[in-house]
Amino acid sequence: MTWPQPTRERHEQFCKVEGWDRVRDARGRTGTHHITYEFGLPDGRILRTRVSHPVDRTAYGASMWAHVLRDQLDVTEDVFWPCVLDGQLPDRGAPEPPREALPVDLVFMLINRVGLTEGQVAELDKAQAIARLQQFWTEGR
């Protein structure tokens, strides 16, 4: 696929869309030649990228652009451009949020009174588990 010309402006836009943090240099200044961004990944790594001043439509050369994508942003063009053009966030491997846990007493009752297996209980959400226990109490099955 043919992508648009990579520019400083689009580099910064990627950082803003994905939610990178703008950081200061070691002396507490924001720097005069670059804007620096950091992004923490779920695996504990911290990515850092620098966008040259001025942030404008100045295009990157092919080798510089390859370096920015590979070594700073840790994405491919197939991930970068949908983020910039459509707001589609990169899949950074964030873990799925856990489902709401069932109360231990409810699990105990479903297994020991109702007769469900642990696997069957694990498939239920809280509302389904309560409904199944209520069915047992009212219908006896």
Image (spheres, rainbow, N blue to C red):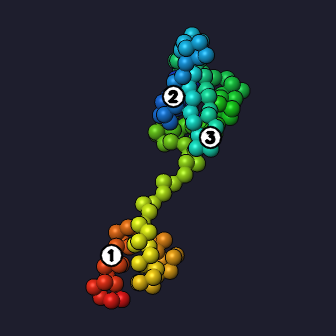
The foreground one among 66 and 46 is 46
Which residue is painted at 55% across and 18% down in the image?
24
Image quarter hosting the C terminus: bottom left
Q: Which residue is mark 1?
A: 131
Residue 42 position (above or below residue 16): below
Tag of residue 6 = none
Element type at marker 3? loop
Which residue corresponds to the image point at 40% horizontal and 72% vertical from the top-left? 106
| Label 2 CA crowd tier, 10 Å (few <14, some 14–19, many 20+) | some
Residue 92, horizontal then vertical, whole percent? 58, 44
Residue 15 picture location, percent across and down: 52, 30
Q: Closer to the N terminus: mark 3 or mark 1?
A: 3
Residue lying at 57% horizontally and 29% vertically, measured from the top left: 38
In-front residue for pair 80/117: 117
Q: Mark 3 highlights which residue? A: 44
- State whether residue 8 appears in this view: no
Q: Residue furthest front?
A: 105
Residue type (three-letter) at the residue carrying disc 1:
Ala
Task: Say above or below: 30 vs 6.
Answer: above
Q: Amino acid at mark 2?
A: Asp
Closer to viewer: mark 3 or mark 2:
3
Q: Residue 120 placed where, x, y %?
A: 48, 77
Quarter of the image where the N terminus is located: top right
Counting from the top left corner in percent of width and height, residue 67 is at 69, 29
Q: CA distance from mark 3 to mark 1?
A: 41 Å
Earlier-in-chain disc, 3 versus 2: 2
Q: What is the residue that sits farthest to the bottom in this orientation?
A: 140
Q: Is residue 106 visible?
A: yes
Q: Residue at x 44, y 63 (%)?
A: 101
Label 2 and label 1: CA atoms lie apart by: 45 Å
- The residue that mark 2 highlights is 21
Amino acid type at circle 3 is Gly
